[in-house]
């Protein structure tokens, strides 16, 4: 619901375009900060700059608990709540040129997105902005009546169209790639889209990664064909896709990134000869692969740094233990030096620039600071702070995240992060092993993490382990986790416990494990396969039965089937032997569980089967189920209720609790719901 310009009670806009720092609202000096400090919705997030550099858009609660989009006019400093909905949180949005915003929300945690668009132009007096429905939400993916769309490419250089995969129109049996007009939702067929013959079009699409050029024309793709990966290109003036390269369906191939401004130079990462990937280009007209442009033996390239119009490759962002810039353009390197000199205590990420390059949006953050957004005006040579991600966080009260390494039992070097609580030097502290989800291609990295800071504030050390199979460490490290659910991936977590004890960090009698999704699986696996290690465990939307999970691969395309065959494993005996639900009798310690009833990824049957076994063997457990949530609790009230339960569970079941005690705290006041 669009609203009139106002002052946000949560955002607190400051826009002077002089170098001004937002003073952090000092949190209470009590040892335990209120839960709301960490888990209320951010004051602003996902800030983006319009192409003309005149407006900022960002996500915020708009004062009544649901996440919507707000708009800032950088010329006048005027703040305006732009759009929100009472029944959903807006999760995704992006600019189309400088006049339209496309956005999507999710109802009930089902990851069923309805896409809409609206013009930012002020509505006529007494009128509301017209919201255009681009697609409908779908409860069952691709049912016959759904006017669904999956966004394939935002099409940065087309101010009016988005490249999507969906139905030709509501009720149509024809699906494919379309350009959709954000003004009215009209769809026209994308050029060069050719579904593979005799293959279900849905499967053909999800077995293919298409890359459009800067005009929205499909020019290249990666396609699965059985156990082969095919790299194909569609040259200008050609009549069909041509085979460029063929790989086995395994690590060691090309990842296609984006086209340069000439629409024939394609950036890619090549892992044929380097595990962590080499940046090169392939010219689809001359069919030539360039010499290596950039390679890092540690870490992987995360993002290209190009001119706004992609006419120049200025550098790359790559990730090791932390993010790093590597510049090829001296002018861009000098600009970063100026930014870093003005903001020396944070990592300063350039998020957006205007089309003319004169206005720059920066996110400055650290492991202790969730971040401040800045706008740099190169025309006037001034920079100003325009918003803090979480005003209530005082970085001085947060704990540093330390990159660590240890050697697993088979000699593989494992990376991770340790966040220690405030405690006297040399004192053994309780430890929470906190495995990430995924498990493959995903990793933990350095930066502000509200969960980690919450647990550290409660007196627990937190160890985040990028076990084998995690992304960011090269193809061999990733493949080392294949078929290792409950096996060597779990051994890496166990070896992390041993390392923390040997380093005189953790009290061996006070080690717990907590994770979500695959991390929830790892919690359950830890309690059944290594029950001697942990004093309790918390499973958040975790997989309990690999056989049940593998059923998702039936009837889908090659990509999903290959995942279950090559990566997770699909042998029935193996699946049964690695499923925690089959070994519940081994659990020795209390277990806390939380699930969303509508979870589209980890079906609620993972809990119902697990609960039956817990009851059968009379194991102590707690359960929190939210009926209107999915794969993680998105509603702010439900999220805070979950962490209240988690906190009480750890306090009760980790001997002695944390190393800090509860003191009087000031209750944070939440924004009041606007009067009707």
Image (cartoon, rainbow, N blue to C red):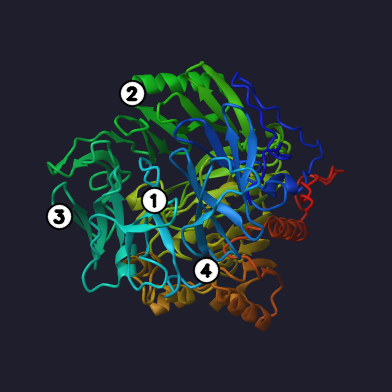
Identify the mark at residue 242; answer none if there is no mark: 3
Q: Earlier in the sequence, mark 4 or mark 1?
A: 1
| Residue with the mark numbered 4 | 600
Decide: is 510 above or below 545.
above
**Cα separation between marks 4 and 1:** 26 Å
Q: CA distance from mark 1 to mark 3?
A: 25 Å
Q: Residues within 10 Å of mark 4 (few under 14, many from 20)?
A: some
* Badge 3: residue crowd in 10 Å (few <14, some 14–19, many ≥20): some
Residue picked out by circle 1:
162
User: Which residue is most to the right?
Assistant: 664
**Numbered disc 1: secondary structure:** strand
Relative image position of residue 295 (x, y in whole percent): 30, 36
Q: Residue at horizontal 80%, vertical 44%?
A: 668
Is residue 12 at all visible to an observer of this figure? Answer: yes
Check disc 2 and report its element: helix, strand or loop.
Answer: loop
Q: Nearer the viewer, residue 233 or 505?
A: 233
Mark 1 surroundings within 10 Å by alpha-carbon count, few (fewer than 14), some (14 through 19), many (20 or more) = many
Q: Position of residue 256 (x, y in %)?
A: 29, 48
């Amino acid at each position: 619901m669009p609203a009139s310009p106002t002052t946000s009670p949560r955002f607190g806009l400051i826009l002077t375009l002089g170098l001004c720092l937002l003073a952090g609202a000092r949190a209470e000096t009590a040892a335990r900060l209120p839960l709301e400090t960490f888990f209320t919705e951010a004051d602003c997030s996902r800030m983006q700059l319009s192409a003309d550099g005149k407006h900022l858009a960002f996500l915020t609660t708009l004062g009544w608990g649901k996440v919507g989009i707000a708009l800032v006019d950088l010329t006048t400093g005027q703040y305006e709540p732009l759009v929100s909905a009472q029944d959903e949180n807006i999760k995704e949005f992006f600019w189309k040129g400088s006049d339209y915003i496309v956005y999507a929300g999710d109802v009930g945690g089902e990851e069923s997105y309805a896409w809409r668009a609206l013009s930012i132009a002020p509505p006529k007096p007494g009128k509301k902005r017209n919201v255009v429905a681009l697609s409908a939400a779908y409860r069952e993916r691709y049912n016959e009546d759904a006017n669904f769309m999956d966004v394939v490419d935002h099409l940065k250089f087309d101010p009016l169209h988005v490249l999507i995969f969906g139905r030709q129109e509501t009720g149509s049996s024809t699906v494919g790639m379309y350009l959709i007009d954000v003004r009215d939702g009209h769809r026209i067929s994308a050029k060069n889209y050719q579904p593979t013959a005799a293959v279900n079009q849905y499967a053909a699409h999800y077995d293919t990664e298409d890359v459009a050029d800067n005009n929205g024309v499909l020019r290249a793709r990666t396609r699965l064909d059985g156990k082969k990966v095919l790299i194909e290109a569609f040259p200008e003036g050609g009549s069909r896709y041509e085979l460029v390269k063929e790989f086995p369906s395994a690590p060691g191939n090309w990842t296609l990134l984006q086209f340069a401004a000439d629409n024939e130079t394609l950036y890619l990462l090549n892992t044929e000869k380097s595990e962590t990937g080499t940046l090169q280009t392939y010219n689809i007209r001359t069919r030539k692969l360039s010499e290596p442009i950039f390679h890092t033996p540690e870490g992987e390239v995360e993002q290209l740094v190009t001119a706004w119009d992609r006419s120049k490759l200025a550098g790359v962002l790559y990730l090791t233990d932390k993010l790093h810039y590597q510049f090829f353009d001296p002018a861009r390197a000098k600009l970063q030096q100026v930014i870093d000199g003005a903001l020396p205590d944070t990592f300063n990420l350039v998020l957006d620039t205007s089309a003319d390059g004169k206005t720059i949006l920066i996110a400055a953050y650290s492991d202790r600071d969730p971040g401040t957004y800045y706008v740099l005006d190169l025309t006037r040579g001034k920079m100003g702070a325009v918003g803090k991600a979480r005003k209530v966080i005082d970085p001085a009260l947060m704990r540093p995240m330390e990159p660590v390494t240890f050697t697993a039992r088979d000699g593989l070097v494992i990376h991770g992060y340790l966040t220690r609580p405030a405690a006297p030097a040399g004192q053994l502290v309780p430890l929470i092993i906190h495995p990430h989800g995924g498990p493959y291609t995903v990793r933990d990295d350095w930066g502000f993490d509200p969960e980690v800071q919450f647990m550290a504030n409660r007196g627990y050390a937190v160890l985040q382990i990028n076990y084998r199979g995690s992304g960011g460490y090269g193809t061999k490290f990733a493949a080392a986790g294949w078929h290792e659910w409950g096996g060597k991936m779990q051994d890496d977590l166990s070896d992390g416990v041993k390392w923390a004890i040997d380093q005189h960090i953790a009290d061996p009698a006070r080690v717990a494990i907590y994770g979500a999704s695959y991390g929830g699986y790892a919690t359950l696996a830890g309690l059944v396969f290594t029950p001697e290690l942990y004093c309790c465990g918390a499973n958040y939307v975790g997989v309990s039965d690999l056989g049940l999970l593998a059923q998702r691969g039936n009837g889908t395309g090659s990509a999903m089937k290959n995942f279950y065959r090559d990566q997770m494993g699909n042998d029935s005996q193996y699946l049964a032997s690695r499923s925690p639900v089959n070994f519940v009798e081994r659990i020795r310690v209390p277990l806390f569980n939380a699930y969303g009833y509508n979870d589209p990824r980890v079906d609620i049957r993972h809990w119902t089967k697990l609960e039956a076994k817990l009851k059968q063997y009379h194991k102590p457990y707690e359960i929190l189920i939210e009926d209107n949530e999915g794969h993680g609790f998105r509603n702010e009230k439900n999220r805070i209720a979950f962490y209240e339960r988690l906190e009480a569970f750890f306090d009760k079941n980790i001997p002695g609790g944390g190393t800090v005690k509860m003191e009087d705290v000031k209750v944070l006041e939440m924004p009041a719901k606007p009067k009707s």
